[in-house]
Amino acid sequence: KKDSLPYAAFSRWQLDLSRDVLGYHLLYWKRKLRGNLPALILPAYRRDAIHVYDEERGYFSIGKELTSRILSYTKTKGISVSVFMLSAFKALLYRYSGQEDLIVGIWGDNRETQANIRDTIGPVTNLLPIRTTVESGTTFSQLLHEVNQSGLEAREYHHIPFDRLVAELNLQKDMSRTALFDVLFHYEDHPVEISGGADLSIRVIETNLGWGKYDFNLFLQRNEDIISGILTFNKLYYSAETISSFTGHLQYLLDNILKDDQRPLLDMPLLSASEREELLSSFSHGAVTEYGDE
């Protein structure tokens, strides 16, 4: 379109951001990311001293009935499905890790806030770190409120490019991990619609561009009445069985959240009846599961 900014012009605009704009945004991020930034530690195989990566993906569907309950809940609460699912994802990471300080990266789409690049062809998204705190008595409702507030603030101060933010923060180098966070989350409310013509055939090709080499990369998409997910993971650190359990626990946690969002996260069951029975049986026979060295 005529009023769309060419990608080269958008790139120059980012490079030429004034010190006043950068300073204004950087002040927020330095305050939000002050102190020791925690590395998320999940049950995994041994982590190498230098980051290595080999991608694999786990596919799952949340299902029609559970999706319907999620849509009803978010409509009643007046929050987005994206915020709700990110909050549930963080709740599960908290239960898996036991860590109270959690940072998860999200995609901040500049197209939403700048009309002149809405139709620009090229990568105009920016990574945003969402940092929230969970305590022993935190309920999902409380976590949801904090994640929503943190997300609103992050999008207000989103102009500073992620690589410049990392450079300005002058983080302590850890060659075994990616900068600021190891886990990425993205939700899309509708799939991309591609329409061809009488003499034109169009198909979408999955290229993995933009996924990044993160330990976990959770992508969720709603297609009408079903939310489906892809969890891209580093198979050098996690097994397919672990990922399958993780996505299953996410769905079981979602079910319990929707039943009672005022219940402390630590009290919410993660295991189904069959899993609990299997676990008890394993312990009664002296079986021990080892995740490997940290």
Image (cartoon, grey):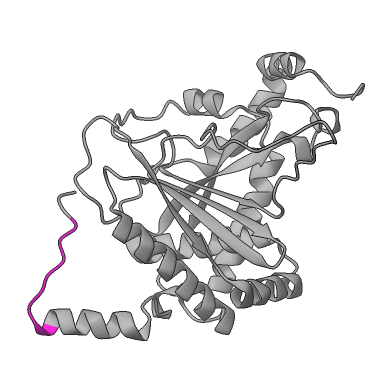
- Residue at the farthest right position: 2
- Of residue 117 and residue 162, the one placed in the foreground of this image is 117
Inspect the magenta stretch and tell me whether residue 281 lies in it: no
Q: Quadrant of residue 134?
A: bottom left
Residue 85 is situated, as x and y percent measured from the top left of the image, at 58, 62
At x 65%, y 24%, the residue is 22
Classify 275 as above or below 86: below
Total numbered circles: 0
* Above or below: residue 40 compared with residue 88: above
Q: Residue at x 43, y 63 (%)?
A: 247
Give the overall secondary structure of the magenta segment.
loop
The residue drawn where x is 27% and y is 46% is 237
Residue in the foreground of this view, choosing between 76 and 193 = 193
Which image quarter is the N terminus in? Answer: top right
Give above or below for 277 relative to 73: below
- In the image, 198 versus 9, the foreground residue is 198
Instruction: Single out the residue that lies furthest toward the left.
Output: 286
Quick check: can you spot residue 98?
no
Task: Describe residue 276's horizontal placement relative to residue 119 as left or right.
Answer: left
Q: Residue at x 39, y 34 (%)?
A: 178
Residue 244: quarter of image: bottom left
Quadrant for residue 180, please give it: top left
| Residue 282 falls left or right of residue 61 | left
Picture coordinates of residue 246, whole percent (x, y): 38, 63
Residue 167 appears in view: yes
Residue lying furthest front in this view? Answer: 199
The residue segment tinted magenta is 284-291
156 relative to 134 in the view: left or right: right
Is 236 rendered above or below residue 121? below
Q: Position of residue 111 (x, y in %)?
A: 76, 35
- In the rendered image, residue 209, in percent from the top left (x then y), is placed at 54, 31
